Image: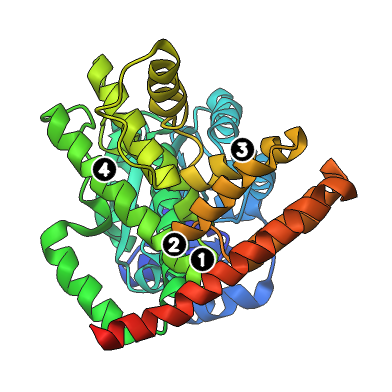
Amino acid sequence: MKTAVVGLGQIGGGVAGALVAAGHAVTVYDVRPEAAEPLASQGAVVASSPADAARGQEVVVVAVVDDAQLRAVADEALPAMASGAVLLVLSTVRIDTLDAVAEQAAPGSVDVVDCGVTGGPKAAATGRLVAMLGGDDAAVERVRPAVDAFSSKAVRLGGRGAGMRAKIVRNMMQYNMWAVAYEAQLLAEAADLDLAALREVIDAGDVYTGGPLALFGTRADEGNMETRRAGAALAHKDLMAAIRLAESVGARVPLTRLVEPDYDAVLGASPGDAEEDVRTAGLRIMAELYNLPSYADAPRTPYLDLTIEHLFGRIWTRPGLDMRQRRLLVIGALAALGRDDLLEVQFSSALDRDELTVDQLREIVVHLAHYVGWPQTTVIGPMVEKLALRSDAAADAAPEDQARG
């Protein structure tokens, strides 16, 4: 098959090499002449421009970096392409860019097939890429011999744009998983864990849990609601444990903080509509926030019911902010109102729950001073130092208690 490859970077260079190795008649072009030299030595013809590369070809493979480069190649190559030829787009670009190129190709009866690829440079160099194709059946079948030369697996996802949409989704998953793994690595290092040993454990466990793709392809609304709520509760507990560990060792976990408040949606766990569910949630939040005894058996009054069921049962349990973030908002409001008594309750509880450290409380005082005024923070500052002394005393007493135990 007469095939051209425009763009000889890490992916395009490997694709061109695989096409030559498979016996196709290959013409190549890159803005960097040196990129074509290894392929010329393998038997590829080196073109002087995208138009020169595209002329007389059955398939023109484009493997450039971005949207602007694809448009530039299309401007030059499409007028030179014969009727019935196919422009095969490997570049990851926006869907509107792909549509624009297809519209540009239509008057010349040139088909555009999008071919998202995954596997990276090593897979490209060995002809082992995985290809995600989008285009009409006839056009996809015409490019099959070329795609099969550089792919270990090629799947048609649907009409034009489907392959590119699949690649974009794939990239989103990959980059997010890498980001999460990096965040986990930073936390593991700060927590003084052996990374090699931890990776061994993760790899072994993923065999049974399914790893990052365990829930992919499932519907969040499948299964029993109570089971989903129980799973979400465990997830919140474990994610909050990770956040607390990060705080204790000075690691940043912004992705974990972003995910935790809305994790119910991942498992399709709604908070429930029953009034008792709301009241139970409110009682739990109150107890967790302030280390208060349970109000479950307290006499029910309109004000207490409203506080438990609306403020704590509905507002504090809303997705979007975790408990620590909401507490910080309350601290700011109480400082503005001059409610030192309630501030002390918030500070004390935040320390007890390991939501805030003493140093973070001191930083809060510095920050608030610029908003609520110096006179007010002359009261808040000593309050924090009193709590710091209490916290230090508790920490000093802990080893003695353990020794006696």
Name the residue that disc number 1 marks: 247
Q: Where is residue 389 in the image (x, y as percent from the top left)?
A: 60, 71
Q: Where is residue 121 in the image (x, y as percent from the top left)?
A: 43, 70
On the rendered image, what quadrant is the N terminus found in?
A: bottom left
Name the residue that disc number 3 marks: 330
Q: What whole-number distance in Å separates the C-alpha atoms at marks 3 and 1?
A: 20 Å
Using residue 114 as the reference point, say whether residue 53 is left or right of it.
right
Q: What whole-number distance in Å separates the C-alpha atoms at marks 2 and 3?
A: 20 Å
First in sequence, mark 4 or 3: give its number: 4
Name the residue that disc number 2 marks: 244
Name the residue that disc number 4 marks: 233
Residue type beneath disc 2: Arg
Q: Position of residue 140 (x, y in %)?
A: 32, 38
In this orientation, which residue lies closer to the viewer: 97 or 145?
A: 97
Q: In the image, is residue 191 above or below residue 291?
A: below
Residue type beneath disc 3: Val
Using residue 104 as the reference point, say whether residue 301 is left or right of it.
left
